[in-house]
Image: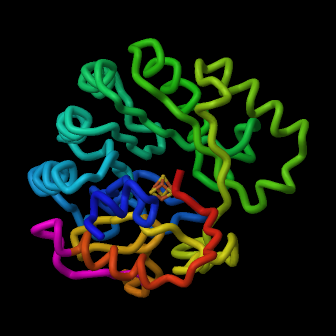
Amino acid sequence: MSVAASIASGTLGGRVWFYSNYHCNLRCAYCLTESAPEVSRRELGKEEILARGREARELGFTAFGVTGGEPFILEYMPELVSGLGAELPTVVLSNGTAFNERRLREVEPLADLPVHVQISLDHPDPDENDEMRGPENFRKVVEAVPKLVERGIGVRIATTLEDPDAVDPEERERLCELHRSLGVPDEDHIVRPIINRGRAMTNEMGVLAGYEQLDPELTLTADGAFYSPFGPTVRGGRLDTDLLVSRTTSPLREPAEALLRIAESRPPGHDTSIGIN
Ligand code: SF4
């Protein structure tokens, strides 16, 4: 089966993920990539991402995702996301803390493109939110989100919890009232579990995720192509390679076909449920 046909049939996920970088201004307790200001950048590069993005569209992929680390601490991120969004619908995962006035001006062109910035916000109480994500995180996020919404930029809120099913309904409702008040409707609020990889594994948090639990979604990093955006995690400063598909990322056809072979070899009846949404 061709890559395009396998995407159409659902054997392969339609989104290609790019790990733009691994460094971050935060140091969250459950971070899959052990990101922090001082870690190795492992930067994929603007031109590389745009070139692979063009190939991805030609191969039949239908969407892009950008993640890290914190993508928006890279100077060229607004321009890069504009380039990707001109090709296919794009979501960028962000901690929402890098949107100063200059950055806000730079992202204004994204309002005219099929682009969403997906910002993390875990709890309606500042102290509880900041316990996992660091001081002042709550304040910065609730300031940034309305400024992005005002500019017409698509914003989603992502809430990451140890056990989404066990959350207190009253707390959940307060969080939903908060995101609505920031201009983000219910359909753009995503709740997902902590994944037991990276710093979450060190801190003994989250649910297990391996081949059986994850959907195949082509994921490119500076170190190669992976089976899922949950693959290129870091623990103890070392990149996890259990979900590595190929060290080669160019031409894109090679890792795409390698991923397809893996996807086709999975026994039928898989019931995966952890998309990195
Ligand atoms: S979870 Fe996201 S915001 Fe937090 S340290 Fe990791 S990359 Fe940065």
- In this picture, which residue range is highlighted in magenta? 243-254
Is residue 221 visible in this depiction of the protein?
yes
- How has the structure been colored for display? rainbow
Q: Is residue 252 magenta?
A: yes
How many discs mark residues in the rendered view? Answer: 0
Q: Residue at x 54, y 70 (%)?
A: 214
5 or 183, which is in the foreground?
5
Report which quarter residue 9 is drawn in: bottom left
252 or 12, which is in the foreground?
12
> Can you say whether 2 is above or below 58 in the image?
below
Q: Residue at x 74, y 36 (%)?
A: 124
Image x and y of residue 148, in percent: 43, 22
157 left or right of 89 in image: right
Q: Is residue 81 magenta?
A: no
Q: Residue at x 61, y 75 (%)?
A: 270
205 left or right of 29 in image: right
> Can you say whether 31 is above or below 138 in the image?
below
Is residue 130 visible in this depiction of the protein?
no
Q: Residue at x 57, y 79 (%)?
A: 268
263 left or right of 254 in image: right
Image x and y of residue 16, in percent: 32, 56
Quadrant location of the N terminus in the rendered image? bottom left
Image x and y of residue 28, in percent: 55, 59
Image x and y of residue 224, in percent: 24, 75
